[in-house]
Amino acid sequence: MKLEVHTPDFPLNQFVDHFIYYEGFNPVHSMDRFLPDGNAEFIIELTDNTKHIYDNETLIELQTFRHAWVSGVRTQPITIPSGRDSRMLIVAFKRGRARPFYDFPMNELADLVVDADLVFGKRIRDLREQLLNTPSIHQMFSLIEKFLLQQSGDSLHANTPSKCIEYAVSNIANQPNILDLQKLTSQIGYSQKHFIDLFKKQVGVVPKQYLKIMRFQKAIQEIENNKSIQWSTIAAESGFYDQAHFIGDFKVFSGFTPGEYMKRKAASLNYIPVD
């Protein structure tokens, strides 16, 4: 398998966590349950293989994609191909920082996967053609950087509302177990209604929903870090009100109870083999 990860230069590194290129990945399973992680992504497939999204329960094909697509913040898991026989370039945006690259608020992309043609038009077809004719992975990353800079235009320059939401997302992601949203809103200085509206447009979901996703993410990270699992301790340290809320939210975000998740999980966080 060939795998390369690249962090773009400034100013893109303030908005993009990393680029990933991979090929030759051939897992034994064909599908993964992909869990909500608070991220938005932009994906280019460099083969002509058709990709699908499947129903989480029946595994029936729900959507079909070729060449490129974008994915918004998710509040539910989706079932996707495992990556077998793929050659992919992935743009993983920083949490809450994808907005400058889209011509619409991020809440319009929440819980959706959309053909990139519908978002970027002919530009994405031209970009993919260039990538296919580029001999090195490093040059591919340079082409992606150029595309994103052109797509964002002047919107990468910080303004007060975007900086406030960046601050909020950082606080929610870094301390979901102790965060008080009312206190956070008062620190930012906007009214609650205005803060929620700004957050939803820039991130994709309202702050309360995003906090739940981050608490779920902390829970599965705690599961990875602890050899001896005490569910009541995991629930408390992840910020859940009680174990019942923990189990309920865990099932919403993964489709499994915590015990079922333990039996099914693999090495890659947020990806659960299902077939």
Image (cartoon, helix red, strand yellow):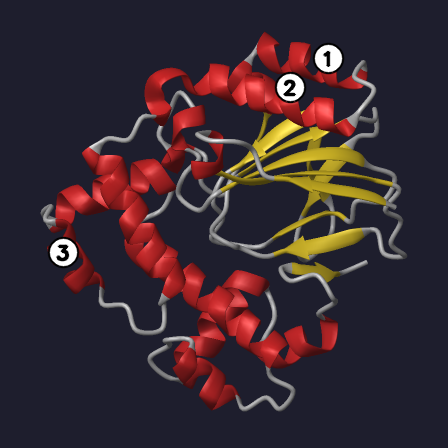
Specify whether 161 is left or right of 72.
Answer: left
Residue contact between numbered discs 2 and 1, judged by CB atoms under 8 Å: yes
Q: CA distance from mark 1 to mark 3?
A: 46 Å
Q: Quadrant of residue 184?
A: bottom left
Residue 158 placed where, x, y %? Answer: 28, 31
Q: Is residue 137 above or below residue 179?
A: above
Q: Residue furthest front?
A: 9
Q: Is residue 15 left or right of residue 228?
A: left
Crowding at label 1, few (<14), some or many (≥20) Cα neighbours within 10 Å? Answer: few
Mark before the other along the chain sequence, 2 or 3: 2
Which circle marks residue 160 in the picture? none
Q: Are marks 2 and 3 in contact (CB under 8 Å)?
A: no
Residue of label 1: 130
Kindly identify the amino acid type of the residue bearing the numbered disc 1. Gln
Residue under pointer 2: 143
Name which residue lies at 44% across and 77% down.
246
Mark earlier in primary sequence (2, 1): 1
Q: Nearer the viewer, residue 254 or 141?
A: 141
Question: How many labels, in total?
Answer: 3
Of 158 and 183, which appears nearest the observer? 158
Q: Residue at x 66, y 14 (%)?
A: 127
Task: Say what amino acid the circle numbered 2 marks.
Answer: Leu
Q: Residues within 10 Å of mark 3 (few under 14, many from 20)?
A: few
Residue 263 in sight in this render: yes
| Residue to which mark 3 is pinned | 187
Which quadrant, please, contains the C terminus? bottom right
Q: Secondary structure at mark 1?
A: helix
Helix, strand or loop under label 3: helix
